[in-house]
Amino acid sequence: MQTIAEEFVLWTLDHTAKLPKCQRHTFGQRLDNSALDVAERIAEARFVPRAQRPPVLLKLNITLERCRILWRLVLAKGWMSEEQSRLIHRLINEIGSQTGAWLKASRD
């Protein structure tokens, strides 16, 4: 069973490979790296002591925002459909909601 983060990474890798060849380096590489950063930061947050989680989770939120911006640009350029955009943003928002709850719990 895939986690939401794994689904996000796999979806990103599949769809950045379909970007126009001239943009795969610029957008594709940045999106791929950001998606992998999301998965790595989630893994890191699971294993650091509770008191050390907030900085990791804040970095995760920043990475998610970077992903949102890049995917909005991909949509604006017409390199993905509205339906694909809704799906990827749903995944990002779900990870963000989980991160926010985790951050709140870490501070309590």
Image (cartoon, rainbow, N blue to C red):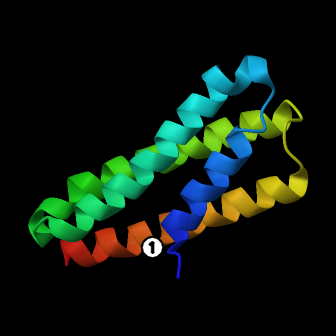
Residue 96 place in picture, x, y as percent = 50, 63
- Viewer-nearest residue: 22 or 86: 22
Horizontal arrangement in the rendering, residue 40 relative to residue 92 (left or right):
left
Q: Residue under circle 1?
A: 98
In percent of width and height, residue 7 lies at 59, 66
Please tell me whether mark 1 sits on a helix, a strand or a loop: helix
Quarter holding residue 80 = top right
Q: Which amino acid does label 1 sit on?
A: Gln
Q: Is residue 80 left or right of residue 62?
A: right
Tell how many labels.
1
Q: Is residue 76 left or right of residue 54?
A: right
- Looking at the image, which is closer to me, 88 or 102? 88
Mark 1: give few (<14), some (14-19) or many (20+) Cα within 10 Å: few
Q: Position of residue 65 (x, y in %)?
A: 53, 46
For the point 30% across and 63% down, the residue is 43
Residue at point 81%, 56% (across, down): 84
Left or right for 81, reference 34: right
82 is higher (above) or lower (below) than 91: above
Q: Which residue is drawn at 25% across and 63% down?
A: 45
The residue drawn where x is 27% and y is 78% is 105
Residue, far bottom: 1
Return the residue nearer the eye: 29 or 72: 29
Which quadrant, please, contains the C terminus? bottom left
Q: Please, is residue 62 above or below residue 108 in the view?
A: above
Farthest top residue? 22
Location of residue 42 (image quadrant)? bottom left
Reply above or below: 9 against 68.
Answer: below
**Spot occupied by residue 82 in the image (x, y as percentages of width and height):** 88, 53
